[in-house]
Image (tube, rainbow, N blue to C red):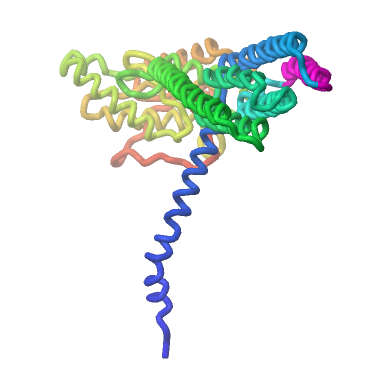
């Protein structure tokens, strides 16, 4: 008799899913905690410099704590042998803490090394204070109060998960390393106060990081708005010039790229005849048509009015002349109902070029195409020395999406 193994596996599937659900939940929780603990601290130079300053402040706090501890040791009678050991620990901290500033802190704050550095520092401080307090009399020593300084230091900088983890570690180390084997009521009281203070520090950290995230979000939104054309939703003149500057900085003869300037022919008549609202609609349609005529990695920007620009890498799969013709034809197809066409001027990017010279050559080429009658592309700067007249069309515009390696990457 044949056994239907498919049915058997299907019958077991709900049970398996039920068994896997807790495992998946635990994995998601662990992943969330891991992200919270090892959150990237800095994404730019300004934020990295902030963290470096914070390390300096921590070193200063460590030095002041050492001096306070030395004063306590010298002014308080201690048991036999306690003074030398406490003074030795204090001396080691005083000498080693400034050495932290010799680490490549700015680079470390940009990856996982940043949070791991702070956690290692906090753990080391906790263990040193725990040993000192144990030597000084265990639960009766006031030295463990120094860890409240460390918790306060973490509250304004560590991610909330990090504050909670380190505060819990400090509380546990006080109970286990300092107080045991005798667990007095005063120990439980101090541990409870430390747990409450940890919770307070977590709230401070949550608010601090939430404010930072809001500020970063606002700055990103402002940068995006500053680089976006409000009419078409694509890059504006500022964004195009930035991307052109980046492309020129890496321009090579064996990796050609071009700039096309596109000026609409007959667009003023649309505004005069149908109104500016109809003109705005047409500009958005023309922008969409040009985006469809190029690759995803090319840049189509509106420079202002009815003038557009395209930045693209060229090669065997797409020559500058072919690109210019595609753009001209895309505008002609979309603007046919309004009597709108395009004059396209092309300029190739050459090593040593600057933004102004490239745009000047492209503008001259575009002007030659317009004075030759419009609805044509001038590619003299990046191909055969000719003004390419319009090619007759037999139907709708082609769906241009050539394959090939990414061209000039869009700026973030």
Q: Position of residue 41 (x, y in %)?
A: 56, 24
Q: Position of residue 38 (x, y in %)?
A: 57, 33
Left or right of residue 379, residue 107 in this image: right
Front residue of this view, candidates 391 and 339: 339
Q: Quadrant of residue 353?
A: top right
Task: Tell me the quarter of the image containing the N terminus.
Answer: bottom left
For the question of whether residue 408 can be seen, the reply is no
Front residue of this view, candidates 315 and 212: 212
Which residues make up the magenta segment?
A: 80-103
Furthest residue to the bottom? 1
Q: Position of residue 348 (x, y in %)?
A: 55, 22
Q: Chief secondary structure of the magenta span?
A: helix
Q: Position of residue 334 (x, y in %)?
A: 28, 31
Name the residue rendered at 41%, 25% in the picture: 300
Name the residue rendered at 43%, 17% in the picture: 215
Residue 93 inside the magenta-drawn segment: yes
Q: How many marks?
A: 0
Front residue of this view, candidates 120 and 399: 120
Instruction: Determine whether 399 is above or below 214 in the image.
Output: below
Residue 346 inside the magenta-drawn segment: no
Front residue of this view, candidates 66 and 113: 66
Left or right of residue 314, residue 138 in this image: right
Name the residue rendered at 47%, 45% in the picture: 28
For the question of whether residue 395 can be seen, the reply is yes
């Amino acid at each position: 008799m044949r056994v239907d193994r498919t049915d058997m596996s299907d019958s077991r599937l709900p049970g398996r899913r039920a068994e896997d659900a807790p495992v998946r939940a635990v994995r998601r929780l662990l992943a969330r905690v891991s992200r919270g603990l090892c959150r990237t601290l800095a994404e730019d130079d300004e934020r990295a410099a902030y963290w470096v300053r914070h390390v300096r402040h921590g070193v200063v706090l460590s030095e002041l704590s050492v001096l306070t501890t030395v004063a306590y040791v010298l002014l308080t009678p201690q048991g036999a042998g306690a003074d030398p050991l406490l003074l030795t620990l204090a001396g080691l901290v005083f000498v080693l803490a400034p050495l932290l500033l010799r680490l490549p802190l700015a680079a470390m704050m940009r990856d996982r090394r940043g949070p791991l550095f702070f956690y290692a520092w906090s753990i080391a401080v906790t263990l040193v204070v725990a040993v000192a307090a144990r030597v000084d009399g265990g639960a009766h020593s006031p030295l463990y109060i120094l860890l409240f300084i460390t918790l306060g230091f973490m509250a304004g900088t560590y991610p909330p998960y990090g504050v909670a983890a380190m505060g819990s570690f400090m509380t546990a180390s006080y109970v286990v390393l300092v107080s045991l084997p005798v667990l007095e009521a005063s120990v439980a009281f101090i541990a409870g106060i430390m747990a409450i203070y940890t919770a307070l520090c977590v709230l401070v950290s949550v608010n601090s990081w939430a404010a930072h995230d809001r500020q970063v979000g606002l700055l990103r939104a402002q940068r995006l708005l500053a680089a976006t054309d409000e009419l078409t939703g694509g890059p504006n003149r500022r964004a195009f010039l930035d991307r052109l500057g980046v492309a020129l900085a890496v321009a090579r003869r064996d990796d050609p790229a071009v700039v096309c300037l596109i000026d609409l022919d007959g667009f003023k008549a649309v505004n005069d005849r149908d109104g500016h609202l109809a003109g705005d609609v047409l500009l958005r349609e023309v922008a969409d048509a040009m985006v469809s005529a190029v690759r995803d990695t090319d840049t189509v920007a509106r420079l202002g009015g009815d003038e557009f620009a395209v930045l693209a890498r060229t090669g065997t799969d797409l020559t500058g002349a072919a690109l210019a013709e595609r753009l001209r034809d895309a505008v002609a197809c979309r603007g046919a109902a309004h009597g709108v066409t395009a004059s396209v001027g092309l300029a190739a990017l050459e090593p040593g070029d600057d933004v102004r010279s490239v745009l000047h050559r492209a503008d001259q080429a575009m002007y030659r195409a317009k004075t030759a009658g419009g609805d044509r592309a001038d590619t003299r700067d990046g191909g055969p020395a000719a003004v390419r007249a319009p090619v007759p069309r037999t139907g709708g515009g082609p769906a241009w999406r050539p394959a090939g390696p990414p061209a000039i990457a869009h700026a973030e």
